[in-house]
Image (cartoon, rainbow, N blue to C red):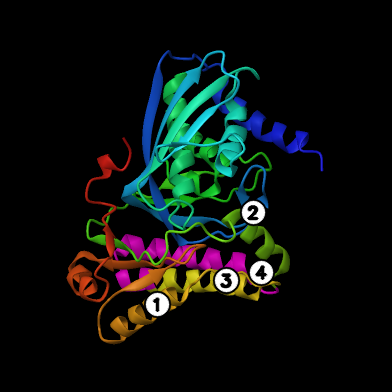
Amino acid sequence: MNRAVPESAARRCAQELARGRVAVVPGSARATCAANIALVKYWGKRDETLNLPVAPSLSVSTGTWGSTAEIAVLPDAAGDKISLNGKQLPAESPFAVRLSRFLDLFRPDARFRFSVETANAMPTAAGFASSASGFAAVVVALDGLFGWGLRARELSILARLGSGSASRSIEPGFVEWRAGKRSDGMDSFGVRLDAEWPGFRLGAVVVSGAEKPMGSRAAMRHCKATSPFYGAWPPTVEKDLRTVRRAICARDMELLGATAEANALAMHALMLASRPSVFYPLPETLAAIRRVQELRAGGVPVWFTMDAGPNPKLLFEAGTERKLRTVFPKLEVLAPFDDLSQARA
C-alpha cells in the first residue's frame, strides 16, 4: 500500500488550518486537556487516515482526569525526544512512533525536531481515553508554540488527526463529535453542547490498569469488517444520540443512563460477534456490572458505560455517591461540571 497519498491528505488538512500562521515562539508551550467518556459511541471509521467516523458520538469530559503536554523545539537534534509519565521513550516504541508521525504534519521541514513531555492523570491505554486527552493537549500546546491562534473547531479537527476521540477533548462538558460528510474532514469536529449539569457524576471502577490486548483502532477495524451485525450500528447510534441530547437538556438521569448503557452493550455485542471475537471484559468487570444491575433493581439510580477496555464507568448524580462507595470502596468519582475552568489549563 502506498502511504504517501493518505499521509499527504492529512498534512494538507493540517497546513490548510495553520496556513499563514506559523511563527515559532522561542521556549516551550504547555497545555492540559480533560479526557472524555463517550455516552454514545461511534465505533468505526469511514476514513482511517483522517479519522472520520461512520457515525457521530457524544461524550462528557472527565474534569480532573486528563493529560498534560509540554512541547519545545529541539535545534540540531537527530530526532524527536518524547517522554510519557516521566520516562523518556525509545524512538521505536509504539507511542513515540505514533506521536512523531503525528508531529510530521506540523514540521516546517524534515530537520525540525520536537521535545514532547506528556503525562496522564489516569491509567494509560486501559480504556480511560488517555489517547484522546493526550493528542488534544499536544495540539493545544502546538497552537501556543506556533502562535496559530486557532478556534476550538479548528483545534478539534487537528486533534482528530491524531486520535478520533481527541476531537471531543478540546472543550469541556458535553461534546458532540459531528461525523460530517466531506471527504477532506473539514466538517467533522467536536461541538460543545450549551448545557451544564452540576450534579452529574462519573465513577471509574478500575479493575485493571494494564494495557489493552488490542488497541481500539485495530479492534474497530476488525469489528467493522467481520461483525455480521455492523450494518445496524450507525442507525442505532443516530437514534441514541437524539435520545441522549434530549436527556441532557432535561437533566433526565434515567433516560441518559439507560440509553448510554444500552449503547455501550450494543458496541460490545458487535465486538463479541466479530470473527474472531474481540472481548475486553474481565471477571471483575462482569462482577461490577452485576452489582450495578443489583443496585438499580434495589432502587439506586446508577447505570454504566464501558469503552474498549475492561473498566466500567458509572453514571449517576451526586446524591447517589455515598451509597455507591459502600459497594465500590475504591470508586474514582469525577465531577465534570464542578469547575469547567479547570478542565483545560
Residue type at tag 2: Lys
Per the model, the C-alpha gap separating discs 3 and 4 is 16 Å
Neighbour tally class for label 4: few under 14, some 14-19, many 20 plus, Cα within 10 Å: some
**Eyeballing the image, is 288 above or below 169?**
below
Task: Tell me what residue is drawn at x 76 percent, y 38 percent.
Answer: 3
Residue type at tag 4: Tyr
Determine the secondary structure under disc 4: helix
Disc number lying in front (4 or 1): 1
Q: Which residue position holds label 4?
A: 230
Neighbour tally class for label 2: few under 14, some 14-19, many 20 plus, Cα within 10 Å: some
Disc number lying in front (2 or 3): 3
Q: Earlier in the sequence, mark 4 or mark 1?
A: 4
Tell me the magenta residue range. Answer: 228-257
In contact (CB < 8 Å): disc 1 and disc 3: no
Q: Which residue position holds label 3?
A: 279
Q: Main secondary structure of the magenta part?
A: helix
Q: Which residue position holds label 2?
A: 45
Q: Is residue 172 visible?
A: no
